[in-house]
Structure formats: C-alpha cells, structure tokens
C-alpha cells in the first residue's frame, strides 16, 4: 500500500521548527554583533542588545517544541495504523 502523505504537505511541528530556526539565527547574529565591540576594543552596545542574544535560546526551545510535536503526531499515527 503506497504512502498517502504527499511530499509537499507540512507535517505537525514543521512550522514550529522553521520558525525556531529563524529566531535562533537572528539571535546568533545579534550575539555576533554584541560581541564584536569587545573584540575590537570599542565601546559596547547598550544592555538591550544582550537581551536580543537570548533569542538563540528562545529559537532553540521553539524548534524543540516542534520536534516534540512531530514525534507525538508520529506516535499517534503509528497507534492508529496498528489498530
């Protein structure tokens, strides 16, 4: 029996994973921008820039939530097929 899932269909959690990756990379860029003045010996950025660096952790958590949601959907699908 062929698989009924289309290759272009979005599985559960895919959007969360993509959004988490985007937020993570924005946080990584903010971290590089924030650390650069320390390496160059210039005046550091304001404190809120360090807060933007926290987006790396937020993106990681969002992507992790997407992975967990995808795992849960796969388990539900496997249980439904086993019955």
Image (tube, helix red, strand yellow):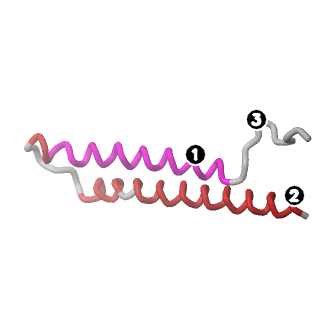
**What is the secondary structure assignment of the residue under circle 1?**
helix
Q: Secondary structure at mark 3?
A: loop
Could you say which is closer to the camera, residue 72 or residue 42?
72
Q: Where residue 76 sits in the image (x, y, percent)?
A: 78, 63
State yes or no: discs 2 and 1 in contact (Cβ < 8 Å): no
Q: Is residue 76 magenta?
A: no
Mark 1: few, some, or many residues within 10 Å (few <14, many ≥20)?
some
**Residue picked out by circle 3:** 7
Determine which residue is flagged by label 1: 18
Q: Is residue 16 left or right of residue 10?
A: left
* 16 in magenta: yes
Left or right: residue 36 versus residue 53 is left
Disc 2 or 1, which lies upstream in sequence? Answer: 1
Question: Dot 2 surroundings within 10 Å: few (below 14), some, or many (20 or more)?
Answer: few
In this rendering, which labeled residue sits more in front, label 2 or label 1? 2
- Please tell me how crowded label 3 is: few (under 14), some (14-19), or many (20+) other residues with Cα within 10 Å: few
Quarter of the figure with residue 3: top right
At x 19%, y 43%, the residue is: 36
Residues under numbered marks 2 and 3 in contact, where contact means CB atoms less than 8 Å apart: no
The residue positioned 46% from the left and 59% from the top of the image is 58
Q: Residue lying farthest left? A: 41
- Pick whichever of labels 2 and 3 is earlier in the sequence: 3
| Residue 30: % across, % down | 33, 47
Q: What's drawn in magenta, residue-wise?
A: 13-37
Quadrant in which the N terminus appears: top right
Cα distance, mark 2 to mark 1? 28 Å
Q: Which residue is mark 2?
A: 81
């Amino acid at each position: 029996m062929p698989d009924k899932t289309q290759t272009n269909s979005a599985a559960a959690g895919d959007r969360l994973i993509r959004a988490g990756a985007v937020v993570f990379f924005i946080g990584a860029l903010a971290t590089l921008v924030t650390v650069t003045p320390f390496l160059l010996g210039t005046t550091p950025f304001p404190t809120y820039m360090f807060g933007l660096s926290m987006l790396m952790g937020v993106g990681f958590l969002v992507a992790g939530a997407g992975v967990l949601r995808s795992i849960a959907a796969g388990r539900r699908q496997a249980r439904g097929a086993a019955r």
